[in-house]
Image: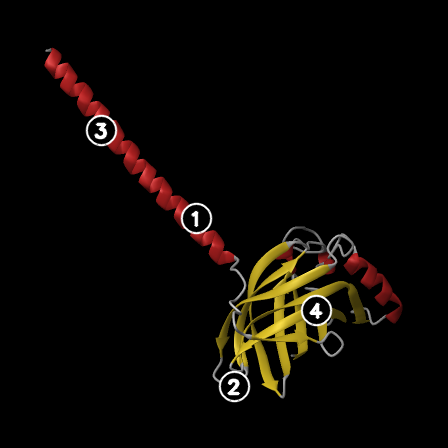
């Protein structure tokens, strides 16, 4: 009888250790999968080792922006914003990386949806306020290239980059062009961004109800023209 009890105890103990080891392996695999998924959402910057670097000219580069109201089709606000600094990396004439820092305090309005120039100054103040980009707290935004795919034509690319606004970073893929001639890079890109992903929520029907015709589109567009030199 005693031998049977000992055997049963040994079987139970052995079964426990087998279960514990199996559970540990499964937990480890789950953690590895989770970490891999997280790292893929916001990748590190592209490898620019041994690349030719070109400094972005703030004076010769420009960014225009456009946003509007969701229900009123013709209600479009337009403006400009300045490049603070940046660089582009090339290997054998092919774009491989780079980054652009944007001066958020330079936001300007060139036309507003109300066709009232007197209200452009009010719109600038609103865009800089906590309702939108909180410029005093977050004076710059940044685009860092993480991946570049060449297009079918020379100088055409599909670029993926980390866009940081208000200390929130999201990965965005967008079309771009970049050519090098006589030591000068001329580049362009168009980014359509969903502001709600960067916690810019004012007037968004993604978060608020009963806004009527005051709903502001979540998407806004940046048209970027860059000139960079060695």
Q: Earlier in the sequence, mark 3 or mark 4?
A: 3
Q: For this rendering, which residue is in front, 195 or 212?
A: 195
Q: CA distance from mark 3 to mark 4?
A: 63 Å
Q: Earlier in the sequence, mark 3 or mark 2?
A: 3
Q: CA distance from mark 3 to mark 1?
A: 29 Å
Q: Position of residue 1 (x, y in %)?
A: 10, 11
Q: CA distance from mark 1 to mark 2?
A: 38 Å
Q: Is residue 115 above or below residue 196?
A: below
Considering every residue shown, the one lying at the far top of the view is 1
- Please tell me how crowded label 4 is: few (under 14), some (14-19), or many (20+) other residues with Cα within 10 Å: some
Q: Quadrant of residue 86?
A: bottom right
Q: CA distance from mark 2 to mark 4?
A: 26 Å
Q: Which residue is mark 2?
A: 154
Q: For this rendering, which residue is in front, 172 or 138?
A: 138
With 6 as the anchor, is 30 left or right in this view?
Answer: right
Cβ atoms at labels 4 and 1 below 8 Å apart = no
Q: Which residue is mark 3?
A: 15
Question: Secondary structure under badge 1?
Answer: helix
Q: Position of residue 179 (x, y in %)?
A: 59, 84
Q: Can residue 77 be seen here?
A: no
Q: Which residue is mark 4?
A: 85
Q: Position of residue 124 (x, y in %)?
A: 81, 63
Q: Which mark is residue 115?
A: none
Q: Earlier in the sequence, mark 4 or mark 1?
A: 1
Q: Which residue is mark 1?
A: 34
Q: Earlier in the sequence, mark 1 or mark 2?
A: 1
């Amino acid at each position: 009888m005693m031998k049977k009890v000992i055997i049963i105890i040994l079987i139970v103990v052995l079964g426990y250790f087998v279960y514990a080891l199996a559970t540990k392996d499964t937990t480890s695999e789950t953690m590895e999968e989770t970490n891999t998924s997280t790292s893929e959402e916001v990748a590190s910057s592209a490898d620019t080792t041994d690349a030719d670097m070109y400094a972005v000219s703030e004076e010769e580069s420009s960014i225009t922006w456009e946003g509007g109201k969701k229900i009123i089709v013709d209600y479009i606000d337009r403006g400009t914003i300045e490049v603070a600094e940046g660089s582009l990396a090339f290997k054998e004439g092919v774009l491989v990386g780079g980054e652009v820092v944007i001066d958020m305090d330079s936001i300007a309005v060139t036309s507003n949806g109300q066709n009232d120039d007197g209200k452009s100054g009010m719109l600038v103040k609103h865009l800089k306020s906590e309702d939108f980009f909180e410029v005093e707290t977050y004076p710059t935004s940044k685009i860092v290239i993480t991946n570049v795919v060449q297009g079918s034509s020379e100088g055409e690319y599909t670029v993926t980059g980390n866009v940081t606004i208000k200390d929130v970073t999201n990965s965005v893929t967008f079309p771009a062009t970049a050519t090098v001639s006589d030591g000068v890079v001329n580049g362009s890109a168009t980014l359509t961004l969903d502001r709600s992903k960067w916690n810019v929520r004012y007037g968004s029907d993604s978060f608020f109800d009963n806004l009527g015709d005051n709903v502001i589109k979540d998407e806004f567009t940046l048209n970027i023209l860059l000139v960079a030199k060695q």
